[in-house]
Image: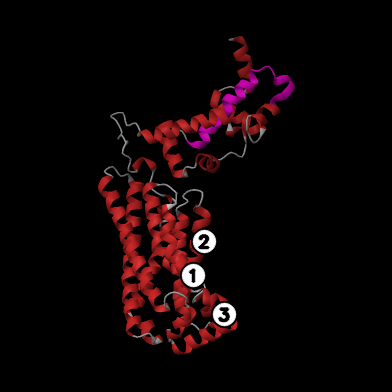
Amino acid sequence: MIFYLSITTLILSLLISYNNYRDNKNSILLAGYMCILSIYNILHFFLFEGNSILGIAILLRHISPLFYIPGLLLFFYVRGTLKNKWSLSKRDLWHFIPMIIGFINIIPYFLIPFEDKIHYAEQLFSTSDFNFLTKTTLIYPFYVSAIIRSVLFFSYVTASGLLLWEFNKLTKRKDESTQKQIKWLIFLIGNAILLSICSFCLTFGFYVDTIVEKTAMNNNIFTVIAGLTFSFIPTVLIFFPQVLYGIPDSDLIDPNRKDKDKNGLSDKNLYLLAARIIEYFENDKPYLDKSFSLDDLANHLDVPKHQLYTCLNTCLNKKFTQLRTSFRIEHAKKLLLSGDLDSKSLQGIWMEAGFSSKTNFFTTFKEETGLTPTEFILLEKNS
């Protein structure tokens, strides 16, 4: 069961990363967190339930240093979600040092022939004795890495919880989207805390007896709890995919923030974003490209799409398509009155204004102005 669940979660993680990268780049961190946990569970299956010697030979050591960073990825994800910002500073790179040291530590394993790795895998599968793996390390023995991983995981999960607690304490105004995000992060951190406790307990048992009985490991209460806990994450994501979109910008902690006034106006940050949108439309005229979309706008401004939704609806009282259409119509009006109509023809006008077809142009122009292009020209000339 754990094998198929882990494979499903691994695939789901990749889909999350692919489908949500443009909307919320922090989803990559969540996908990385889930991928590493999935791979760890697959390795556990190969060691104690399955019979894939090749799987053990590949997963046991080659990627084991990745098991140092799931807690770190969770911390970065929580921090990025709360700040609604995708960024890793140079200081953040220091957090990856344990993983780098972990890779250095297993250099001897990388250098031995693959036939020897198969032999190690067979020996491990038949005896479950991890002691011989000390021969494949450079700095510290294999069993030390287990406690390091557990300590790092628990530490970063605790730090994530403190970040969320601080955010929840300082952010007084929360809309429905923010409430969902907070509940999702509470669930995710609580889930990780339970996993870290199980990890500590299993690691302690490993120190007591490095020769692990497969039946005892599979029936261990902490193994069962960890498996069930892990299964809840993909379940929540399948039924509540909106938790991936992040917290709206208007609900972020901002020392210069101003709450809505008596007229219900949005805060300073949203209006600054609205000004950037209008400036981009006026100066660069991206709407003249008939394929111009909200994704393109989000990429150019480096702003998540859900922020643009909030800004457009709150500050400009328009959807993106309405804003794009209004700028296209205004541009078409200028072309119609420029005196170049004879040389360009109406087809040249609607193509240059960014419309996808003549029919779309005439229909939209009529809806926006109440006139056909010809009637508009005659009216303007006679006025």
Q: CA distance from mark 3 to mark 2?
A: 31 Å
Query: How far across and down, in percent of the image, does residue 81 sit?
Result: 39, 51
Badge 2 marks a residue whose secondary structure is: helix
Q: Is residue 113 above or below residue 361?
A: below
- Residue under numbered circle 3: 112
**Nearer-N-terminus badge (3/1):** 1
View extreme (right): residue: 343
- Residue under numbered circle 1: 104
Badge 3 marks a residue whose secondary structure is: loop
Q: Main secondary structure of the magenta part?
A: helix
> For the point 70% across and 28% down, which residue is it?
348
> For the point 61% across and 10% down, which residue is it?
382
Label 1 sits on what residue type?
Ile
View extreme (top): residue: 382
View extreme (front): residue: 139
In depth, the one of 33 and 337 nearer the eye is 33
Label 3 sits on what residue type?
Ile
Query: How far across and down, in percent of the image, does residue 157 sit?
Result: 33, 62
